[in-house]
Image (tube, rainbow, N blue to C red):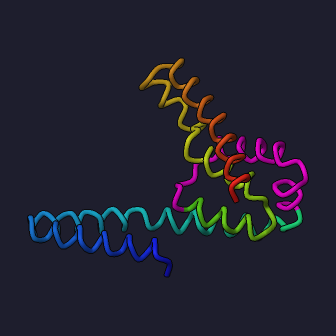
Amino acid sequence: MDIFTRCLWVITAIAFTVSIIKDKERTFHSMKMAKGMMKGMMGQIIGILFLIGLILSFIPPEIIKQYLGGPNILTSSIFSAIIGSITLIPAFVAFPLIGSLINMGASVVPAVAFLTTLTMVGFVTFPLEKQEFGFKFAVVRNSLSFVFAIIIALVMGALI
């Protein structure tokens, strides 16, 4: 276990202890609520993981390497950013997927472009966003998010 993970565990333990000391009843009530929420999400999480595993088993590593690990990083980054923009996958499922794609030959830059657009751009959620915040806001926010996702991917490629 790395130092960052150990620090997070220590911080969590301290916060949990402080919470119990401050109000034991509310802490345990919150834990019961979180347990119920996790039970409700477990079926979806398992289904998404199964679907990702199924998709990755049918897509040969050569195809992933060809489209996401090719010589033209910008083109493959834009391609994966578009896919990430129209895909609706929870971020906690996307991280293992990105790791699998990189292990199968995808470059880091397109993988980061996919991940950032997945969490920042919402093609699927656009109608709801348009309804709640207005058309102009939704278009501007999603467009800027797409551009910044590409920039973040390119910067990460330069750093890694």
- On the picture, is 6 further left or further right than 59? left
Residue drawn at x 59%, y 35% as measured from the top left: 145
Residue drawn at x 21%, y 63% as measured from the top left: 30
In the displayed structure, would residue 112 be above or below residue 18? above
- On the picture, is 43 further left or further right than 148? left
The answer to if 121 sits in the magenta stretch is: no
Q: Which residues are magenta?
A: 63-92
Q: Residue 25, position in %: x, y?
A: 9, 67
Quadrant in the picture for the C terminus = bottom right
The answer to if 68 sits in the magenta stretch is: yes
Quadrant of residue 75 within the rendered picture: top right
- On the picture, is 14 further left or further right than 22? right
Residue drawn at x 61%, y 67% as measured from the top left: 96
Query: Residue farthest to the front?
Result: 159
Question: How many numbered callouts?
Answer: 0
In the displayed structure, would residue 92 be above or below residue 140? below
Q: Residue 159, position in %: x, y?
A: 68, 55
Mark yes or no: residue 48 visible.
Answer: yes
Q: Residue 154, position in %: x, y?
A: 72, 46
